[in-house]
Structures are given as C-alpha cells and as structure tokens.
Image (cartoon, grey):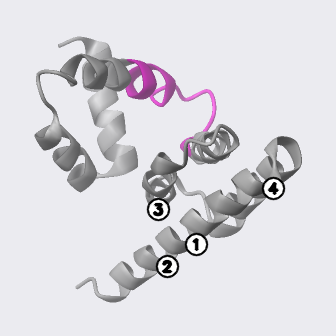
Amino acid sequence: MSNRYDAGMKTRREVLGDAHVDRAEAAKSVFDQPFQDMITEGAWGTLWADDTISRRDRSLLTLALLAATGNFAEIPMHVRATARTGATPPEIMQAFLHVAVYAGVPAANHAIKLAKETLAEMEEEDRHAP
C-alpha cells in the first residue's frame, strides 16, 4: 500500500474510531475494494490528513456539505466523529443553519433531525459506558 493509504487509514481511525473502521473493513468485498482504497487514499490520506484547517473545521464543513447536497446517510457517522474532531453540538447547529439559508430549509431540517437522534444516542451510550 502507498504512504497516502497508510496516512489515510491512520486519519480515518483517528476521526471515525477503530470500531467503525473495523466494521467497514470487515464488510469490504473484492467488488468495492477499489472504491474503499480510493476514499482511504483520497478523502482520508489527502484531504483529512492535511492540517491546513483543523479537523473540527473540516468536520463542520463536511456536515454542511453532506446536508446541502442531500447526502444524509453519512450525517450520523460524521456527527459521531465530532466526538473526536472537537466540533460541538452548538457548532453543528450553526453549520446546519448555514445550510438552511444557503441550500434550503428542508435539507437543514432533515440533517438536524438526524444529528439530534445521533447526539441523543451518543449521550445514552456515554451514560452506559463503564
């Protein structure tokens, strides 16, 4: 594997957590491996590994872009990642308020619903953690 792949896997684990990455890796098949390699190298090994902007800021940008483009399936994963990137619930809300103004209220509304559910799940998990 390339240095960019290794950097990507390291960054991916730091942002998403080992449990998430381990599940994703276990679910990987011969069919989707080229895609998984590409996002590990490109998204995680190039973009997320770059320190020009903070992971907190990158996290907020990602949430806003996912909502604005209607890619709602990844919002819960990236809300969970904020526990590691340092983006706070009020900052997440501000990102989605920007989506409402610049990309549409329905997109922001759905993203807020998903974030609210995910943050509640995270709170519940923290209450039951040893």
Q: CA distance from mark 3 to mark 1?
A: 14 Å
Residue 83 - label: 3
Q: CA distance from mark 4 to mark 1?
A: 16 Å
Residue behind mark 1: 116
Residue behind mark 4: 105
Which quarter of the picture shows residue 3?
top left
Which quarter of the picture shows residue 11?
top left
Q: Amino acid at mark 1?
A: Lys
Image: 38 above or below 99? above
Q: Amino acid at mark 4?
A: Val
Q: Residue at x 60, y 57 (%)?
A: 87
Q: CA distance from mark 2 to mark 1?
A: 6 Å
Which quarter of the picture shows residue 65?
top right
Q: CA distance from mark 4 to mark 2?
A: 22 Å
Q: Residue at x 22, y 43 (%)?
A: 24
Image: 125 above or below 18? below
**Residue span colored magenta:** 42-55
Q: Nearer the viewer, residue 45 or 31?
A: 31
Residue behind mark 2: 120
| Nearer-N-terminus badge (3/4) | 3
